[in-house]
């Protein structure tokens, strides 16, 4: 990677006015974003980028008069909750007619040929499988990003979209003064897989595919989380008047010069054969792309010809989608086995005759839960269809009932845990069955230990699932408290366990005794107590004993702790096995007390008040105000309602919020008044 000196480090920078410095940094950062996220060719290191960004943030903070909503600093998002405003599309967002066979593609081609009765070009493109977005630019600046919604109107998700680094906030080159560009927001496969791994560790439901993950992320209320999810975007449709050219392809090539990420895989074709070749090539090659695609889009290239062809009520006559066939295979179901997860959830797994599917050999597929098995009316020996589609885990989508010559035994969901024999339970409203034997069912024990040692919990290095499994099989650990009884001598000489590795593990276990109360709480693995809930609880109780004696009412009075979480906490502490585990962990010296120093600056001046922060501020950031509210006993809320005590109002408050506040007669407090309330 090349590095170079920046203008901002040079002498000239020092002689610039503040405004010029800010503009210079913004321009450079926009360019580096583009180099990295669109061109995939960074010219500076991450550290240099971060340093520049920090310098700009500092300048902007000190000089709020130069605030710009399209500054690169806006990409980090904000943690303000907001309801999305509905916006009408200037041109409705139509969908495309779908085709599934070469014959249908050929019909489309012939229809176009007949209607135009002149030469034409078809632009072939990949059909990206994400969530569609419409971006409006005026004078080279992104002013609005709206989801498809119902095609007529969608949600204004501008703040979230600004966090997507491959979407330019300001353009360069010779762009038209006002235009709209549409495209697809995507979550790359690697980001999706990582996100699901994290979700799994937190026991949250997984996203089934990157499309759901992308659209779910785009609708998050908190744009700071959106920023962390690393979405990407390809643009594929330019609208406006004037546009640079009569060619769709040529317009997109121009847009790529202005800073947009345009697919490199578009191709202008002049015959049906060329189209079929494109389809055939990408049906295979798409598996090597970093993002999901589910077909090919064919578009008549000339805008004049597009206008001639026109639209049906739902879709253009000048374009069509060819959908790739979800890969499907037929194979025999030999057996259904059941896996027990760390929470005790039971997953039924179909064991199949090995079959080739999307380049891998599939022997097992998820059957999800008892209802799915029942719905398929599965019998052992059935010939079943296995599909991968956009999902990661193959699933059984049907049974070839004609192939049922000898009907095997009907698949019945088990009633007892295959690992420990406990009777399974099914919570009301839940699809899954659970093994309730939390403290003695082996996969649950191992799972709990793995969670306990994980990075965000006790962060015990050097211990992975395999080592945990080995220690468990050797009888060295039966629960998390046993970890603190391990000595180097106990583990040295075990498989792949030399002096150094053993020492490191023991050192890391010892160091975990300093992990603060909130993370210890999270590490315990109480159902529904994730990182955020653990933090809230740790702030509200002096120590674990106080928490252990809290009743449902006390727990639910804490912000964001609902009945389900409270009930789970109460049951956890009621269980004598958990009580003795905590006593043993305490005896080992873990932090079961809140660090009172963290609470300095806390008052109850805002106790009982629900406050909505809105607009932009000069003296502190929104985050700082949020913390101030919490530290002084108040509650932050994202939306205005009858319960709002007052609004901490900055500049540029949104019109809908203003209107609502006036309607409900809610008091507005500016930042100076607010700070004096606390002083
Ligand atoms: S063009 C009027 N091009 O597929 C035509 N769409 O049902 C506007 N899509 O909602 C769409 N890749 O979300 C177009 N290269 C591509 C596309 C594409 C994916 C999506 C888009 C649209 C849906 C069509």
Image (tube, helix red, strand yellow):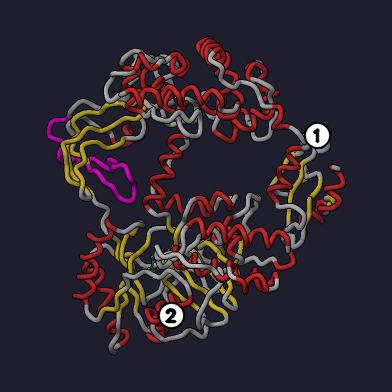
In front of the other: label 2 or label 1?
A: 1
Disc on the earlier residue, 2 or 1: 2
- Check residue 241 for magenta coloring: no
Above or below, 126 against 637 in this view is below
Q: Name the residue carrying label 2.
A: 254
Above or below, 273 against 559 in this view is below
Residue 475 placement: quadrant: top left
Q: Quadrant of the N terminus?
A: bottom left
For residue 72, say whether it is visible. yes
Residue at the image position 84 percent from the left and 42 percent from the top: 678
Q: What is the distance, in whole Å, between disc 2 and disc 1 at their CAs?
A: 58 Å
Residue at the image position 26 percent from the left and 46 percent from the top: 387
Please give left or right for residue 638 compared with residue 332 in the image: right
Q: Residue furthest bottom?
A: 118
Name the mark on residue 672: none
Residue 66 placement: quadrant: bottom right
Residue 603 placement: quadrant: top right
Q: Give 7 or 572, whichever is nearer the viewer.
A: 7
Return the x and y of residue 189 as percentages of the image width and height. Answer: 37, 52
Please give left or right for residue 538 compared with residue 359 in the image: right
Q: Quadrant of the C terminus?
A: top right
The answer to whether mark 1 is within 8 Å of ligand 1 is: no
User: Magenta residues?
Assistant: 385-407
Element type at marker 2? helix
Element type at marker 1? loop
Residue at the image position 45 percent from the left and 71 percent from the top: 313
Please give left or right for residue 36 compared with residue 288 in the image: right
The answer to whether mark 2 is within 8 Å of ligand 1 is: no
């Amino acid at each position: 990677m090349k590095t170079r000196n920046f203008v901002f480090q040079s002498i000239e920078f020092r002689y610039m006015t503040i405004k010029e410095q800010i503009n210079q940094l913004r321009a450079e950062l926009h360019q580096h974003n583009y180099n990295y996220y669109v061109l995939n060719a960074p010219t500076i290191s991450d550290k240099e980028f971060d340093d520049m960004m920090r310098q700009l943030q500092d300048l902007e903070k000190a000089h709020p008069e130069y605030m710009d909503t399209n500054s690169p600093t806006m990409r980090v998002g904000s943690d303000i909750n907001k309801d999305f405003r509905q916006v009408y599309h200037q041109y409705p967002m139509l969908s495309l007619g779908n085709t599934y066979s070469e014959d249908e593609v050929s019909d489309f081609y012939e229809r176009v040929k007949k209607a135009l009765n002149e030469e034409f070009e078809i632009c072939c493109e990949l059909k990206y499988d994400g969530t569609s977005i419409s971006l409006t630019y005026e004078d080279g600046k992104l002013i609005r990003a709206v989801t498809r919604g119902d095609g007529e109107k969608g949600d204004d998700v501008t703040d979230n979209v600004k966090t997507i680094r491959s979407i330019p906030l300001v353009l360069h080159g010779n762009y038209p003064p006002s235009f709209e560009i549409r495209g697809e927001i995507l979550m790359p496969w690697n980001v999706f897989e990582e996100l699901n791994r994290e979700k799994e560790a937190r026991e949250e439901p997984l996203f089934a595919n990157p499309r759901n993950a992308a659209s779910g992320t785009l609708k998050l209320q908190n744009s700071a989380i959106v920023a962390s999810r690393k979405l990407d975007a390809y643009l594929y449709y330019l609208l406006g008047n004037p546009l640079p050219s009569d060619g769709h392809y040529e317009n997109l090539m121009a847009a790529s010069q202005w800073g947009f990420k345009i697919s490199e895989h578009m191709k202008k074709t002049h015959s049906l054969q060329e189209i079929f070749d494109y389809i055939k090539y990408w049906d295979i090659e798409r598996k090597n792309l970093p993002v999901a695609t589910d077909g090919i889009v064919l578009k008549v290239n000339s805008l004049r010809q597009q206008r001639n062809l026109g639209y049906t009520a739902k879709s253009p006559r000048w374009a069509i989608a060819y959908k790739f066939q979800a890969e499907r295979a037929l194979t025999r179901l030999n057996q259904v086995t059941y896996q027990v997860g760390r929470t005790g959830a039971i997953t039924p797994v179909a064991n199949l005759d090995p079959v080739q599917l999307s380049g891998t050999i599939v022997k097992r597929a998820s059957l999800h839960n008892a209802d799915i098995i029942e719905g398929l009316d599965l019998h052992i020996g059935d010939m079943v269809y296995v599909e991968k589609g956009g999902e990661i885990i193959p699933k059984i989508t049907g049974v070839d009932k004609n192939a049922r010559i000898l009907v095997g035994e009907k698949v019945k969901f088990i009633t007892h845990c295959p690992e420990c024999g406990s009777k399974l339970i099914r919570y009301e409203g839940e699809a899954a069955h659970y093994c309730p034997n939390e403290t003695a069912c082996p996969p649950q024990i191992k799972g709990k230990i793995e969670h306990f040692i994980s990075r965000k919990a006790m962060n015990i290095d050097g211990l992975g699932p395999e080592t945990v499994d080995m220690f468990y099989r050797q009888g060295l650990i039966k629960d998390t408290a046993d970890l603190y009884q391990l000595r180097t001598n106990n583990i040295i000489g075990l498989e792949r366990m030399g002096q150094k590795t053993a020492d490191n593990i023991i050192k890391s276990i010892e160091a975990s005794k300093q992990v603060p109360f909130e993370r210890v709480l999270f590490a315990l693995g109480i159902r529904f107590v994730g990182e955020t809930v653990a933090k809230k609880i740790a702030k509200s109780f002096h120590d674990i004993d106080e928490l252990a004696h809290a009743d449902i009412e006390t727990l639910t009075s804490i912000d964001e702790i609902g009945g389900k979480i409270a009930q789970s906490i109460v049951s956890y502490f009621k269980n004598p096995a958990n009580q003795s585990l905590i006593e043993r962990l305490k005896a080992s010296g873990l932090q079961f007390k809140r660090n009172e120093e963290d609470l300095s600056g806390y008052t109850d001046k805002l106790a009982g008040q629900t406050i909505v922060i809105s607009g932009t501020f000069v003296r502190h950031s929104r985050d700082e105000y949020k913390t101030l509210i919490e530290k002084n006993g108040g509650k932050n809320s994202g939306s205005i309602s009858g319960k709002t005590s007052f609004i901490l109002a900055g500049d540029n408050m949104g019109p809908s919020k203003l209107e609502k506040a006036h309607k409900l007669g809610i008091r507005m407090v500016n930042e100076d008044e607010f700070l004096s309330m606390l002083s």
